[in-house]
Amino acid sequence: MLNEVLQKHWGYSSFRDKQEAIIRSILDGKDTFALLPTGGGKSICYQLPALLFDGVCIVVSPLVALMRDQVQQLKSKGISATYLYSGLSSNEISIELENIRNSRYKIVYVSPERLQSKAFKQNLKRTQVGFLAVDEAHCISQWGHDFRPEYRQIAEIKEQFPKLPILALTASATKNVVQDIIDQLKLESPAIYTKSFKRDNLSYRVIYEENKRNKIVELLQRTNGSGIIYVRTRRKTKEIADLLNKKKIIADYYHGGLPSQIRNTKQDKWINNEVRVVVCTNAFGMGIDKSDVRFVIHYDLPESIEAYYQEAGRAGRDGKRSICSLLYEESDVIQLRTMVSSQFHDIKHISRIYESFCNYLKLAVNSGLDARFDIDLADFSRKFELKPLDVYTALKQLEKLGYLHLSPSFYRPSKLKVSISSTLLYDFQLRYPGFDKLIKTVLRSYAGIYDYYATINEATLAQRLRWTVAEVKEKLNRLNDLGVVSYQKETEKPFVTFLQRRVTEIVDREGLLKQSKKRSIAKVNAVVKYLESESCRSNEICSYFGESTSDTCGVCDLCLLQKRLTLNKGDFSSIEDQIMDLIQSKKCRPIDVMKQKLSEDLDNVRDVLYWLVEDKKIILDKSGYLQPSN
């Protein structure tokens, strides 16, 4: 029965390791925990049983983009699904809630915030629910790498539906995180399924490099296939993509600040191999179903092994050899430590920002429980002479402490980009002088606005122009209608909800923030330990997640180095000479060399070929053929 459903909707003849056992566990009505590393097929573990349960499967998911992608994929398979998030209008929400009650969908994705809304909870009482799936369940854990306080309230659904089975899924979790997830979700004697963190087809490599941009070009020129380059800032995504395109490497950039329609288009072009490389922030990749990613490069250091493992794990989902390269220099380690430390403030600083914030909102002491306020981060920061990033990180810490809640769209201000050339814009200013002052102010205020969307603040522009905010928005709307600029207004007004009455003193209960900072620093130390490792990279990752393994991967940079040191010098020279003679006599791709059986041990041939490329004795040309470098 299960195999028939799998074949019908997904086209697979058999399950991957652990999938069938997880599905049978949830079908038996048991609380279940599944830890399947990236590429392990988590989605099928709840999507397939949803088709066999009476009623609807509710899936809690952290990202709107992830929900949208999953729903699109399900619909393409003939499975009825929808997703609810805070960006929908009240009318759209009402219609969808009625559809859910009437069993129009088998799978409904919701954000953790939407799950807590009164309307949704009341609707669930009149809905037949088969089971609840919590995707990216590590978000519930204070030990995890993406702690989300709102996830902690998911367990309240268990109180409403005591017999409702819950399936928790994640791709990366240490033993502490696993136990914390089980405790927070109140799973009852859960069946626990974990799959090895070892990915035998991934070749992990750490490269110390001061000129990282040149190194990226070099790596791509001798690597075939499509891939991802992860960077930390939005600015770098475009800069590096532009560099690659100048080197005739078809690339595009992607980050969370782009409009959703543009993000979708960029993503689709990469999936369909119209674009070879996507340079992106960590907003890209989660839930994307592309199996033939041949490489993942980290231009900047990740904040944790969990983050690195998930991002690197987007390579080689088809089981074929893929390369995961991590570039760094000494200053990167210093910057990472500084960045992580800057995310935490002492309790006095947090209290000062909290007091200023409450004053800004005119909130009296002992009032404000469940009060919701629209907020303007830039305006607040300017009036109280604070740095916006300091304000944001302090408010996030207040959220962790349970004092307030920030809406998911909290940090989504307006965007603006000039749509015409500088020559045409100058001509427009001459023809329509009423717009001249605004245009000049915009150009002086925001660099690079011809090339990419800049985050703008209408209140700041109004202050500089000595106009009203309404006048600024009206003229920007007019410029947008004329096609001079692309003006993207906030799709949802940011807001904050107070979870407690205003207090006179902020208290770090049980030292939560100190513990959180300590854990974050420990995660950075684990990244540095990985960089400095002298043993198998894959084993280093497995060890971090509490998995002991004695067998080395044989394909990471350190394993390959060890092989080179132990390979008989005569054997190495013999294979090298044969490879050089072969590529000089005819055009060969790497696969052609492997077919020649230059040694009884094909692994030795593959490794020597790798070393020759690494030592730049041979190169891959643009067509994927091997050539002597001189």
Image (cartoon, rainbow, N blue to C red):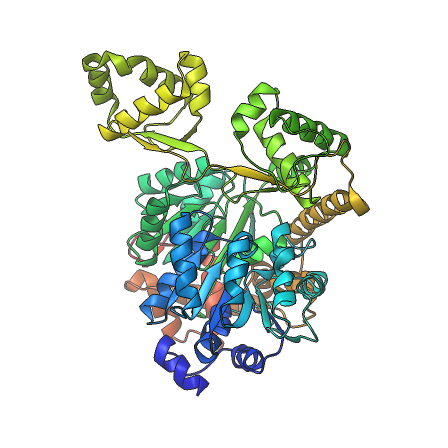
| Residue 429 place in picture, x, y as percent | 24, 15
In-image side of 550 versus 247 (left or right)? right
Identify which residue is drawn at 61% across, 64% down.
157
Identify which residue is drawn at 57% across, 25% down.
380
Residue toward you, 159 or 333 = 159
Identify which residue is drawn at 62% across, 42% down.
370
Quadrant in the picture for residue 565: bottom right
| Residue 618 showing in the rendered view | no
Identify which residue is drawn at 50% across, 66% down.
58
Residue toward you, 216 or 108 = 108
Position of 480 relative to 148 (above/below) = above
Outermost residue to the bottom: 1
| Residue 128 place in picture, x, y as percent | 49, 72
| Residue 373 place in picture, x, y as percent | 56, 35
Q: How many marks?
A: 0
Outermost residue to the right: 510
In-image side of 126 versus 559 (left or right)? left
| Residue 502 place in picture, x, y as percent | 70, 34
| Residue 6 showing in the rendered view | yes
In-image side of 214 versus 379 (left or right)? left
Quadrant in the picture for residue 179: bottom right
For the N terminus, the image quarter is bottom left
Position of 478 relative to 341 (above/below) = above
In-image side of 62 versus 436 (left or right)? right
